[in-house]
Image: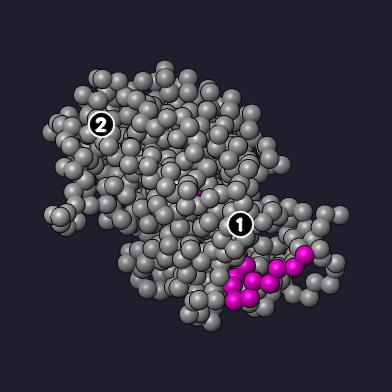
Amino acid sequence: MPARTLLTARWVIGHQDGRHVVHENGEVVIEGQNVLHVGAGFDGEVAARVDYGEAVISPGFIDLDALSDLDTTILGYDNAPAWKKGRVWPESYVARGPYEMYEPEELAFQKRHAFAQLIRNGITTALPIASLFYREWGETVAEFEAAAAAAEDLGLRAYLGPACRTGGQVTDDAGNIRAVYDEARGLAELEQAADFAKRIDGIAGGRIRAMFAPDRIETCTEALLQRTADIADEMGAPVRQHCAQSPVELRLVAEQHGLGPIEWLEKIGALRPNWLLPHGTQATEAEFQLIAGAGATLVHCPLVSARHGGMLKSFPKCRRMGINIGLGTDTFPADMILNMQIGMMTARLAERMDAIRSEDMFDAATLGGAQALNRPDLGRLAPGAKADITVIDFSRTLQTPDPVQTVMTSSSGRDVRDVWIDGRRVMADGVIPDVDEATDAARAQAQFDGLIAKYPDRTAGHPPVEDIFTPSYERAKA
Ligand SMILES: [Zn+2]
């Protein structure tokens, strides 16, 4: 019998009869990789006890669009339009030959660094996402081999697969954006991704699984999506497909296929229950109906959407329609608590104050993600479920009478104190073993500064860096 560990805290979010329940002065017993007992009054033997005091022991968060690079969207926060700011390849950059803006070892480091940050924010299951703007084409198997090693080492539960695409966009110097394709290259990379998927699916005691990631829908041809759908179905793996997220995407898809992005997915037979769709902020009523009918998952990333002036319209409506909703961080910081808080606010802005309650958003960050992955053993603390646990400290927080409402009003990712994944304590008192947070942050910053210096190469008209990224206030003269 594996050693048991008993955790106690003022609050425990357990799970009974298909719903989360709150235990006050509760306990959780871990045995091996699983939860053995939740509630109170466990009278069996335990090898170790941890009392978290004023804290909530919560199911770990499931991040379906988990930030896994040094996020370039933060560079666009006060710098638009995207085509003028290095987020659409200019024709001149394509003509000279796109190139990888990071070295392979930098990409490998970034995955490990990102995974550590996900854990720090209480994310226990992650489906990594990164931008392809600074890549030569798709993501590589090599960097995902490194990602698998990092997830295995750090103890993160991860669904891994390199992003593939058969196309991209270019802009001329006036901002006219058009689609370009290299289908043979994208299909070859998909075959490599499929080999990788078969190799890693189920390693690390089942903690690492395969996923497929055709990039944004306007960068994918029908052949890529259909082949992806077939391989993923055969393996029972999830597919993540960005769609209905931008007006340029809607225009490009409409020009080529005469349909909305989700309508097109459905028409070609790719809208299936194992498909996870960020972000849906541009989806029509008819498209929401298609998602609901297919049993697919909408991946809601409220922070990144709101930063760009957008929101899902709306989270409460999608719930009423019966759409499964999961959450994604997708931007820096990878703070799922902040994401839930912004999600609450934008849902209320989209509808009314009483259209959403804290538990609706909390469900999305836990049970919605588990449903998306067809994993009834994740996203909940119940006997037999995986021991994937996030402990959020309340000792410096003004608490409401309810722990979930306290998280929504008063907490931040920085309050995550301990994280357990698969029964292993992967972070204790904010410290991840063998990770030097300050050294890694400095290394990440140096890599990011190097990338910023290269922005003129792939920005229309090739302006200097200081013209791409405008200042808030003028730099004071010495
Ligand atoms: Zn995204």
Residues marked 2 and 1 touching at CB (< 8 Å) = no
Report the magenta residues as a range. 48-64
The answer to whether 166 appears left or right of 361 in the picture is: left
Q: Is residue 61 magenta?
A: yes
Callout 1: 10 Å neighbours few (<14), some, many (20+)?
many
On-image quarter of the N terminus: bottom right
Dot 1: what SS?
Answer: strand
Residue at the extreme top of the image, as rendered? 184
Q: Is residue 375 visible?
A: yes
On-image quarter of the C terminus: bottom left
Dot 2: what SS?
Answer: helix
Q: In terms of depth relative to the viewer, which is nearer, 341 or 445?
A: 445
Residue at the extreme bottom of the image, as rendered? 401
Q: Which residue is mark 2?
A: 458
Name the residue rendered at 55%, 34% in the picture.
Answer: 146
Rendered position, 336 above or below 85: below
Q: In terms of depth relative to the viewer, which is nearer, 130 or 378?
A: 130
Q: Which residue is mark 1?
A: 427
What's the amino acid at mark 1? Met
Whole-percent x, y for residue 6 in the image: 75, 67
